[in-house]
Image (cartoon, helix red, strand yellow):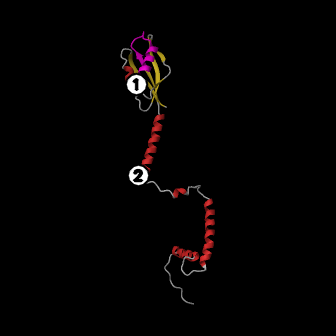
Amino acid sequence: MSPVPAYDLSLDELSMALSYVSAGLVSGAGPAAPAAKAAAPAKKAKKADDDDFDVFGDDDDDADDEPKESRKDMLARLKKEAEVRTAKKEAKQRTLVGIEIKPWSMEQDLMELWKKITKTVVQDGLKWGENCNLVDVAFGIKKIQTQFVMGVNNSSDEVQEAIEALEDEVQSVEILSMNVL
């Protein structure tokens, strides 16, 4: 028996060499070529059977064929999506503000004053309550308690200053409560 020559090949290299021999790709392998042609359809059928069952439920084979977007394009897309989500959240954010308005005199018609305030103080995103309450302070003096809903872009200080601008009819305006809706 002759000694076995020492080959310095790894297992991967040996398996590649074996696959070439079995596929008939090595020159001089005449009888293996027809067997390789017959084995090719069997391998395709076996591979098709393997593709039918996907353990992770990922049926997106086409995703690998598509070119991936560049990092710059991906960051731009993600930034745009974040801006849309933020704008949508801001559109939903509202604040309910309760205020009380104190008039200068007892003889003043408070309902008429309230109607005047709701018609003169108008801003985008500001909606006044449908009614108001007249609350006794002391000695027959009453004050108006009402509420309004404002958006993110509105300021309760601006509304308060606009009401106080009616100096002849309004003594003071106080904010009673602010609740985010």
Q: Is residue 14 above or below residue 52?
A: below
Q: Position of residue 54 (x, y in %)?
A: 60, 58
Quarter of the image that includes the N terminus:
bottom right
Sequence-first tag of 2 and 1: 2
Determine which residue is flagged by label 2: 72
Which numbered mark, 2 or 1, is in the foreground of this view?
Answer: 2
Q: Which residues are magenta?
A: 101-122
Which mark, by number, is residue 159?
A: 1
Element at badge 2? helix
Q: In the image, is residue 109 part of the stretch drawn in magenta?
A: yes
Q: Amino acid at mark 1?
A: Val
Q: Nearer the viewer, residue 167 or 87?
A: 87
Q: Amino acid at mark 2?
A: Lys
| Circles 2, 1 touching at the beta carbon (< 8 Å) | no
> Where is residue 99 shown, x and y percent of the image?
44, 22
Query: Considering depth in this image, is 60 or 66 the residue closer to the camera?
Result: 66
Q: Quadrant of residue 120?
A: top left
Q: Residue furthest top?
A: 107
Would you place residue 41 above or below residue 119 in this image?
below
Q: Is residue 138 left or right of residue 25?
A: left
Q: CA distance from mark 2 to mark 1?
A: 44 Å
Query: How crowded is the residue under tag 2: few (<14 C-alpha within 10 Å), some, or many (20+)?
Result: few
* Quarter of the view holding residue 20: bottom right
Quick check: 14 above or below 170?
below
Classify mark 1: residues with Cα within 10 Å, few (<14), some (14-19) or many (20+). some
State the image coordinates of residue 89 (x, y, percent, origin top left): 47, 37
On the image, the x and y values in percent for residue 98 come to 46, 24
Identity of the residue drawn at 62% across and 72% down: 39
137 part of magenta stretch: no
Residue at 60% over, 78% down:
32
